[in-house]
RNA sequence: GUGGCCGUAGCUCAGUCGGUUAGAGCGCCGGGUUGUGGUCCCGGAGGUCGCGGGUUCGAUUCCCGUCGGCCACCCCA
């Protein structure tokens, strides 16, 4: 009998390690809720064409990283490599944005790549999309939200790498200038860079193989039209007012074609893996039109949950149980189990060890299962009392059964 | 997709210059006589030495393939 294994590049996240993931999900939902975002739940697969057009034919993601398959009717479908295209498609389909819409999402994404630490074929992103708002404060708000999320997740020393790539009209002139520059140095460029020069010359700027060749290259931030320039100035001023530290990174361009103006990434300084960005985002004012909708300004971000958990480091897991019920002997098991049920109905996070186990073994289980306290059901039950012990301090006392929730609240 | 390193208990790893009973630490289970964890002591369970093939009297050890992991490039969250 061959043992099964999970597919290459996938991770199983089991208890108790999944506690950290639950915490990340709850934290994100809570935080984005505070900023007024509500969940958008869209399919995990879409017509292949949506990503080809939305994300961009010339991007690596579309070119070679998609999980594409045909369904039984012969339709070409693709497991989503990112969520923005789906959310925008869904909103257009529902009639577009009237006023603004603030959507959040959480879930698995899929890219066919050679796996590495922090780079899985199925990975998890949490993100928000601020739709229908062109004001620079929207960019500021979204950047701040991602930054706060990383703080709440205890990722140390996060830096915001910030740039602007201007508007499409700004880029036409710039593109010609950049291409000319690259043409002069074509001998110094890597093979990758040469082919990329044709399709998407801006992407050569952040190629690690070409840092030297590209050192003096013209950069989009120096080729902004007046509106894009003013927008970027406002974004910077807004970040300053909110005390969000950032660093201008003129060569940051990002690999998804739909971005314009503001783009950024979050880079934790102490997380020195190659896959260093734990989140990123940008403005994408042309995407709605590109996908057949009305012109709608928008800005959004995506946070890489796998990488955030890696970057936060392996600290100890939180305790998840308020109370562990211990039966003083086999005679007390039924009573204890019934009481456990009542405790749970009352909202106490409680558990007990089942089966015939010694008191000692039950205490041990309480500790290992992450309980903060133990309650012993035994002879004192007849007097309407239980013995409770705080496992963190080691103190113990006898209390009335109905006082248990109050006691838990105090400990 | 390219190049490199690696794959022995649940985890981290040692080991066999090819030889018959494969080890440690941690973890897990039990015990140290009465109903008390996290420390200590004792005992126990647990291994197709990733998988397939080849060489050999004999392979976990050598060779090839394959699958998986890691690292760099690449890509991006």
Image: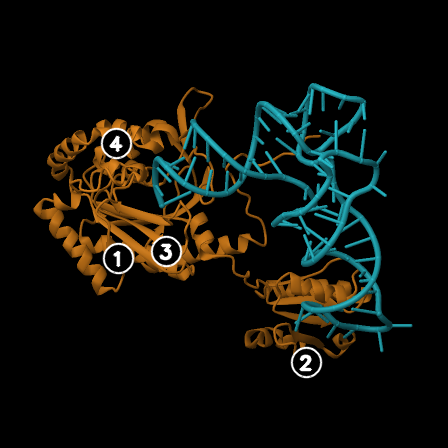
Q: Report the disc number at residue A189.
A: 4
Q: Report the disc number at residue A246.
A: 1
**Front one among A289 and B41:** B41
Near mark 1 (Cα within 10 A), the count class, few <14, some 14-19 or many ≥20, is some
On whether disc 3 and disc 4 are found on a single subunit, the reply is yes
Report the residue at 45% width, 23% height from top: A71
According to the picture, the residue beneath numbered tag 3 turns out to be A269
**Based on the displayed image, in which of its 4 quarters is residue A4 positioned?**
top right
Is label 4 in contact with label 2 (beta carbons under 8 Å)?
Answer: no
Q: Earlier in the sequence, mark 3 or mark 1?
A: 1
Display colour for chain B: cyan
Chain on which label 3 sits: A
Nearest to viewer (mark 4 / mark 2): 4
Whole-percent x, y for residue A229 in the image = 12, 49
Near mark 2 (Cα within 10 A), the count class, few <14, some 14-19 or many ≥20, is few
Q: Name the secondary structure under disc 1.
A: strand
Chain on which label 2 sits: A
Q: Name the secondary structure under disc 2.
A: strand
According to the picture, the residue beneath numbered tag 2 turns out to be A397
Chain on which label 1 sits: A
Q: Name the secondary structure under disc 3.
A: loop
Above or below, A399 against A205 in this view is below
Display colour for chain A: orange
Chain on which label 4 sits: A
Image quadrant holding the C terminus of chain A, namely bottom right
Image quadrant holding the N terminus of chain A, namely top right
């Amino acid at each position: 009998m061959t043992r099964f294994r999970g597919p290459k590049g996938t991770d199983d996240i089991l208890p108790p390690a999944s506690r950290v993931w639950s915490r990340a999900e709850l934290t994100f939902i809570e935080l984005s809720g505070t900023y007024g975002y509500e969940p958008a739940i869209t399919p995990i697969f879409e017509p292949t064409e949506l990503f080809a057009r939305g994300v961009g034919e010339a991007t690596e993601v579309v070119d070679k990283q998609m999980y594409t398959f045909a369904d039984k009717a012969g339709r070409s479908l693709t497991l989503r490599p990112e969520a923005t295209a789906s959310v925008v498609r869904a909103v257009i389909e529902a009639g577009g944005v009237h006023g603004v819409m603030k959507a959040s999402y959480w879930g698995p994404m899929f890219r066919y790549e050679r796996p590495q630490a922090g780079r899985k074929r199925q990975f998890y992103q949490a993100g928000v999309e601020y739709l229908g708002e062109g004001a620079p404060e929207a960019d500021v708000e979204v950047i701040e939200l991602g930054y706060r999320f990383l703080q709440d997740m205890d990722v140390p020393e996060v830096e915001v790498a910030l740039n602007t790539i201007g508007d499409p009209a700004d880029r036409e002139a710039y593109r010609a200038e950049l291409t000319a520059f690259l043409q002069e140095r074509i001998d110094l460029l890597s093979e990758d860079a040469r082919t990329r020069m044709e399709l998407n010359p801006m992407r050569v700027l952040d190629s690690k193989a070409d840092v030297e060749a590209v050192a003096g290259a013209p950069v989009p931030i120096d080729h902004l039209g007046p509106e894009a320039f003013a927008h970027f100035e406002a974004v910077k001023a807004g970040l300053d007012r909110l005390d969000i530290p950032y660093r201008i990174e003129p060569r940051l361009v990002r690999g998804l074609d739909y971005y314009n103006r503001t783009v950024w990434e979050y880079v934790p300084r102490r997380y020195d893996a190659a896959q260093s960005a734990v989140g990123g985002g940008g403005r994408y004012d042309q995407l709605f039109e590109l996908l057949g909708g009305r012109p709608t300004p928008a800005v959004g971000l995506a946070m890489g949950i796998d990488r955030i958990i890696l970057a936060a480091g392996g600290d100890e897991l939180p305790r998840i149980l308020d109370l562990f019920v211990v039966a003083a002997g086999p005679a007390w098991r039924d009573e204890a189990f019934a009481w456990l049920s009542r405790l749970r109905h009352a909202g106490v996070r409680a558990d007990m060890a089942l089966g015939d186990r010694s008191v000692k073994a039950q205490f041990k289980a309480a500790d290992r299962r992450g309980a903060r306290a133990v309650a012993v059901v035994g002879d004192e039950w007849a007097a309407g009392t239980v013995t409770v012990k705080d496992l963190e301090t080691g103190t113990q006392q006898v209390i009335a059964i109905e006082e248990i929730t109050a006691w838990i609240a105090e400990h």
